């Protein structure tokens, strides 16, 4: 016979506790090495170019998913991108209230396949899809070669 | 059912930690396999990915994560997983894609990046144990293999020296393997017997440690092979798989019945009536040295309790009557779980097409069998291949 009453507390019944105590170290890989070193040292985004397919991949990768060629050419991503979509997060991932609400954007760049998710450094009222943005990176001495070297996307100077 | 051949294979080097991401390792192995088959990604109809628990790489839905490196972009793509058995099982899944007539060309790509898991993959292996009966006792996974090994030794009166010979043979065989992590031309039985005790009777050199790596094979229909005039091919003539009881306490720790059932299925399909006479060489799964012996008996290539004798007499050496793990196996090349396909299916292809280089068996071989073992020591899968 199974539990017939609703309960959210499994400890009321005979139960055992456990946890899966695994931690991880993820290598950034060959393309990731190029991408994060350029971000740290030069404060810019790199894409990987497939000359056969005429594609630039962001984030960069060592192979073209279309023709499966090995990619060895890395090119700078255009400085100005466009907000493809955005969300205003009123709760963080634990469900706790985010105050003030955070604006998160998915940004794409002209002629580049893919894009990046990051903070949109604008108020919810000012944020809108289609707005032009560029990355704001942390000062050189604060950069360590991770995605957090980017503070977020800020509205391009040409827009309000 | 249509006839299916292996027409290309590739694998990365195996190392405790590789810089490449899982996707990048998959790409390297896949590119190599396609190049060796003389095909481009456009020739591939469908893709099968094989990889072990997500918890090793630390990426949930690992099959989906790896798919672009596997060449699966915008193709029918499936991940399969049978624990360590994936090393051979993914090829069986690829085989049914082609044998059924659904696809002409299928890529099979296996990957494992165990180094992501810290401090050691043991921390996730431990959760294979039953969460209520076993885990509160804080067992290490090696305990279960130690009990199986001890039972095998006790029932047949096998000496540890005779088991250690397998580790020595395979680590020496691996000297000719360009991907090997554990090759050692000078290792002796004494080295194995003097290595650190992990859980008696399992010592450090009785076991293959965790690793990073990827491997790939290309399968094609006989029609495609004929049309493209592909010369280097080895036919898959039989496949079999079987799983035993979910309770390890209900299994026979001495004889792997599930392997024998899988082998009988594969031999039946391949019309192998007397395996010991008709199989020229074998690549059984050898994450522990005693497992090679266990599996030779399960594959009906040795009588019960006889495999250590065959090993001692040199029958299983590369130039013996029944070469076993001429690749160097998991004990010599390494054990990135699913990626061991490179030594199981890959080695059969390379040996049967005369492309094994320094590892080539000196006499002619026409029929080989490979086998992998997985889940919680209860899963067997077997592939018979012919030149």
Image (cartoon, grey):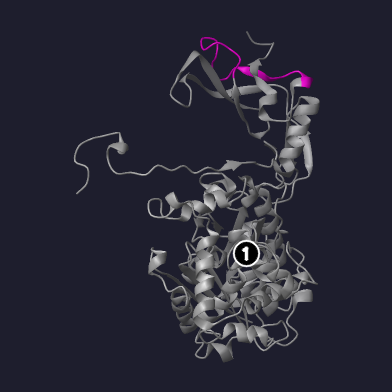
Q: Nearer the viewer, residue B144 or B242?
A: B144
The answer to whether residue B47 is left or right of residue B137 is: right
Is disc 1 placed on a helix, strand or loop?
helix
Image spot of residue B8 (x, y percent): 67, 68
Residue B358 vertical position relative to residue B45 in the rendered view, above or below: below
Residue B318 vertical position relative to residue B193 in the rendered view, above or below: below
Q: How many marks?
A: 1
Give the quarter of the figure containing the C terminus of chain B: bottom right
Q: Quadrant of residue A155?
A: top right
Image spot of residue A18 (x, y percent): 43, 43
Q: Nearer the viewer, residue B288 or B202?
A: B202
Answer whether residue B229 is visible to the viewer in this image. Answer: no
Image spot of residue A160 (x, y percent): 62, 8
Answer whether residue B282 is visible to the viewer in this image. Answer: yes
Q: Quadrant of residue B88?
A: bottom right
Q: Dominant secondary structure of the magenta stretch?
A: loop
- Residue found at x 52% / y 61%: B143
On whether residue B102 falls in the magenta region, the answer is no
- Residue found at x 38% / y 54%: B133
Image spot of residue B131 (x, y percent): 41, 51
On whether residue A140 falls in the magenta region, the answer is yes
* Magenta-tinted stretch: A120-141
**Label 1 crowd bin: few (<14), some (14–19), many (20+), radius 10 Å:** many
**Disc 1 sits on a residue from what chain?**
B
The answer to whether residue A64 is left or right of residue B55 is: right
Q: Nearer the viewer, residue B4 or B299?
A: B299
Question: What residue is disc 1 on?
Answer: B340
């Amino acid at each position: 016979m199974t539990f017939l009453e609703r309960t959210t507390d499994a400890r009321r019944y005979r139960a055992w506790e456990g946890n899966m105590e695994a931690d991880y170290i993820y290598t950034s890989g060959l393309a990731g090495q190029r991408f994060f070193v350029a971000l740290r040292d030069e404060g810019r985004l790199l894409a990987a170019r497939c000359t056969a397919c005429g594609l630039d991949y962001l984030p960069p990768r060592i192979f073209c998913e279309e023709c499966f060629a090995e990619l060895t050419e890395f090119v700078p991503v255009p400085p100005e991108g466009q907000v493809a979509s955005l969300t205003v997060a009123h709760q963080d991932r634990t469900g706790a209230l985010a105050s003030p609400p955070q604006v998160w954007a998915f940004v794409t760049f002209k002629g580049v396949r893919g894009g990046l998710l990051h903070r949109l450094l604008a108020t919810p009222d000012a944020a809108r899809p289609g707005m032009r943005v560029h990355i704001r990176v942390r000062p050189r001495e604060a950069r360590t070669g991770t995605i957090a070297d980017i503070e977020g996307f800020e509205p391009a100077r040409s827009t309000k | 059912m249509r006839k299916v051949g292996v027409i290309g294979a590739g694998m990365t080097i195996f190392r405790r930690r590789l810089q490449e991401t899982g996707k990048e390792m998959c790409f390297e192995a896949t590119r190599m396999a396609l190049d060796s088959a003389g095909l481009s990604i456009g020739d591939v109809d469908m893709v099968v990915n094989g990889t072990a628990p997500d918890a090793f790489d630390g990426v949930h839905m690992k099959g989906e994560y790896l798919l672009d490196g596997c060449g699966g972009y915008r193709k029918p793509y499936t991940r399969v997983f049978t624990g360590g058995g994936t090393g051979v099982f993914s090829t069986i899944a690829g085989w049914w894609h082609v044998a059924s007539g659904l696809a002409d060309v299928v890529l099979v790509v296996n990957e494992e990046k165990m180094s992501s898991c810290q401090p050691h993959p043991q921390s996730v292996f431990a959760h294979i144990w039953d969460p209520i009966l076993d885990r509160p006792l804080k067992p290490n996974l090696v305990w279960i293999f130690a009990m199986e090994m001890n039972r095998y030794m006790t029932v047949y009166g096998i000496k540890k020296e005779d088991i250690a010979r397998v580790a020595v043979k395979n680590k020496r065989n691996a000297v000719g393997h360009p991907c090997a992590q554990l090759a050692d031309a000078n290792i002796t039985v004494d080295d194995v017997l003097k290595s650190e005790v992990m859980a008696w009777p399992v010592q450090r050199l009785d076991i293959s440690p965790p690793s990073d790596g990827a491997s790939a094979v290309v399968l094609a229909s006989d029609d495609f092979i004929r049309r493209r005039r592909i010369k280097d091919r080895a036919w898959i003539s039989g496949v079999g798989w079987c799983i035993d009881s979910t309770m390890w306490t209900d299994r026979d720790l001495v004889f792997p019945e599930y392997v024998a059932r899988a082998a009988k299925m594969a031999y039946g399909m391949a019309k192998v009536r007397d395996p010991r006479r008709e199989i020229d060489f074998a690549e059984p799964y050898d994450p522990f040295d005693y497992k090679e012996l266990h599996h030779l008996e399960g594959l009906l290539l040795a009588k019960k309790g006889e495999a250590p004798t065959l090993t001692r007499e040199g029958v299983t050496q590369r130039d013996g009557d029944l070469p076993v793990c001429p690749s160097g196996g998991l004990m010599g090349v390494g054990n990135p779980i699913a990626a061991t396909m490179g030594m199981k299916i890959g080695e059969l292809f390379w040996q049967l097409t005369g492309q094994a280089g320094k590892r080539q068996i000196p006499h002619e071989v026409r029929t080989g069998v490979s086998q992998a073992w997985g889940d919680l020591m209860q899963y067997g899968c077997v592939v018979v291949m012919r030149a």
